[in-house]
């Protein structure tokens, strides 16, 4: 399984755009990149998923370069409610398992 | 759509006692997972079911942990006897292949276990 590396923590001010970069140097051809968000006392929640280039939904954007060895989660105009832990994961549909790292603890400052 | 239901929400027990957690997945989801999340860490997969069969239980401490998914719907996770290091949040998640292509797993809110 491809291991992921992401910053342990990040701080940002309200209204800013936040970019969290994740490296996954050993990603396999069949692997997808997925991001989850976790608030205290809740289970992780799916944010976005992609294979290559750029994916955008109502919550975030995901940028994946051509070599797919890294990815960047972009959160536009963050608010205090975006304070959470963000996990970058790599998985394939063959085994359906998600292997979590320690994630990035994002703190939004008013 | 109803989410993944888990109970109880909190549980405090003494070491060497037993405890059981219950999970009701999203209707129609064939795959069910139990994760253990220790404070400050990411969730760790304990066991994965496909319908009522076990797909992966390689990280389940089988000397004290057991899980079942009768009839391929609800699931229970049991710990007997509990140790202090079992204090954690136990998360249940479910998925279907269709959901994975369009999104991801759905997690419950978890059961916070404290062993004293």
Image (cartoon, rainbow, N blue to C red):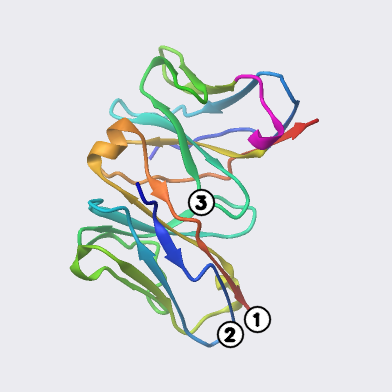
State the extent of the magenta-drawn residues as a range: A76-82
- Where residue A3 sits in the image (x, y, percent)? 46, 38
Judge by depth and name the residue closer to the eye, B73 or A66.
B73
> What residue is rendered at 65% in x and 81% in y?
B116
Give the chain of mark 2: B
- The residue identified by callout 2 is B15
Q: Residues within 10 Å of mark 2 (few under 14, many from 20)?
A: some
Specify the quadrant that holds the C terminus of chain A. top right
- Where residue B81 sits in the image (x, y, percent)? 48, 84
Please give the label number shown on residue B116: 1
Q: Residues within 10 Å of mark 3 (few under 14, many from 20)?
A: many
Please give the label number shown on residue A43: 3
Q: Quadrant of residue A105?
A: top right
Give the chain of mark 3: A
For marks 3 and 1, give the CA distance.
24 Å
Q: Are marks 3 and 1 on the same chain?
A: no
State the SS at label 2.
loop
In the current view of this chain or complex, which residue is farthest to the right?
Answer: A110
Q: Are marks 2 and 1 on the same chain?
A: yes
> What residue is rendered at 28% in x and 29% in y?
A30
Please tell me whether residue A79 belongs to the stretch shown in magenta. Answer: yes
- Where residue B47 sits in the image (x, y, percent)? 35, 61
In this rendering, the answer to whether B74 lies above or below A47 is below
Quick check: A102 left or right of B6? right
Q: Do labels 2 and 1 touch, CB within 8 Å?
A: yes
Is residue B79 visible to us here?
A: yes
In this rendering, the answer to whether A37 lies above or below B116 is above
For marks 2 and 3, give the CA distance.
25 Å
Specify the quadrant that holds the N terminus of chain A. top left
């Amino acid at each position: 399984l491809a291991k992921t590396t992401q910053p342990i923590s990040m701080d940002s001010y309200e209204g800013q755009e936040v970019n969290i970069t994740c490296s996954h140097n050993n990603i396999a051809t069949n692997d997808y990149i997925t991001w989850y968000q976790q608030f205290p006392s809740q289970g992780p929640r799916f944010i976005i998923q992609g294979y290559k280039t750029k994916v955008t939904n109502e919550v975030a954007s995901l940028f994946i370069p051509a070599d797919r060895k890294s990815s960047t989660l972009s959160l536009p105009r963050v608010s205090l409610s975006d304070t959470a832990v963000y996990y970058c994961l790599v998985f394939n549909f063959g085994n359906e398992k998600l292997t979590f790292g320690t994630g990035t603890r994002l703190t939004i400052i008013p | 759509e109803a989410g993944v239901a888990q109970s109880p929400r909190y549980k405090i027990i003494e070491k060497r006692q037993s405890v059981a957690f219950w999970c009701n997945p999203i209707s129609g989801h064939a795959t069910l997972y139990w994760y253990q999340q220790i404070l400050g860490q990411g969730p760790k997969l304990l066991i994965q079911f496909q319908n009522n069969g076990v797909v992966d239980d390689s990280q389940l401490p089988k000397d004290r942990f057991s899980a079942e998914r009768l009839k391929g719907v609800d699931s229970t996770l049991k710990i007997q006897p509990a140790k202090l290091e079992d204090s954690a949040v136990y998360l249940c998640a479910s998925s279907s292949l269709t959901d994975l292509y369009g999104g991801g797993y759905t997690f419950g809110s978890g059961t916070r276990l404290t062993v004293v």
